[in-house]
Image: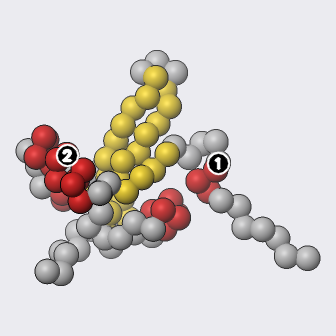
Amino acid sequence: MSRKKPNILEHELVPKHEVLSVREAAELLRKLKIKPAQLPWISIDDPVVKAIGAKPGDIIRIIRKSSTAGETIAYRYVVVDTLRPRKKKV
């Protein structure tokens, strides 16, 4: 009998993660007047990053439920490792 692998995205403690479109990412960076690498980083090896299929250079929106604020939104820049960002190939 094989065991079904649990879906980490369905766990109650894991907030919603979504990859921003190129347009959404550009708008966010313009609004904040920053470059992608100035966002907090998240490793490509993070289990949620793997589960949502994000790639290095993507920006992820994380939506957390909060008892005091209702909902909070955070953004993360996907990197190969947390020591340095990987440059996208043109």
Q: Is residue 31 visible?
A: yes
Q: Is residue 68 above or below residue 29?
A: above
Provide residue 27's location: percent of width, then percent of height: 17, 47
Q: Nearer the viewer, residue 84 or 54?
A: 54
Give above or below for 89 relative to 24: below
Which amino acid type is marked by label 2?
Answer: Leu
Q: Is residue 81 visible?
A: no
Q: Residue at x 71, y 61 (%)?
A: 6
Residue at position x 52%, y 21% in the image: 67
Residue type of the residue flagged with mark 1: His
Q: Which residue is mark 1?
A: 11
SS at mark 2 in the image: helix
- Graded by Cα atoms within 10 Å as few (under 14), some (14 to 19) or many (20 or more), the crowding at tag 1 reads few
Compare marks 1 and 2 and give the one earlier in the sequence: 1
Residue at x 51% of width, y 43% of height:
15
x%, y% of residue 61?
Answer: 36, 48
Residue 47 in picture, x, y percent from top left: 52, 63
Residue furthest right as drawn: 1
Quadrant of the image for the C terminus? bottom left
- The residues tagged by marks 1 and 2 sit, at their Cα atoms, a distance apart of 28 Å
Is 6 left, or right, of 18 in this rendering?
right
* Dot in front, 1 or 2: 2
What is the secondary structure assignment of the residue under circle 1?
Answer: loop
Using the image, tell me which numbered label, if any, was put on residue 28.
2
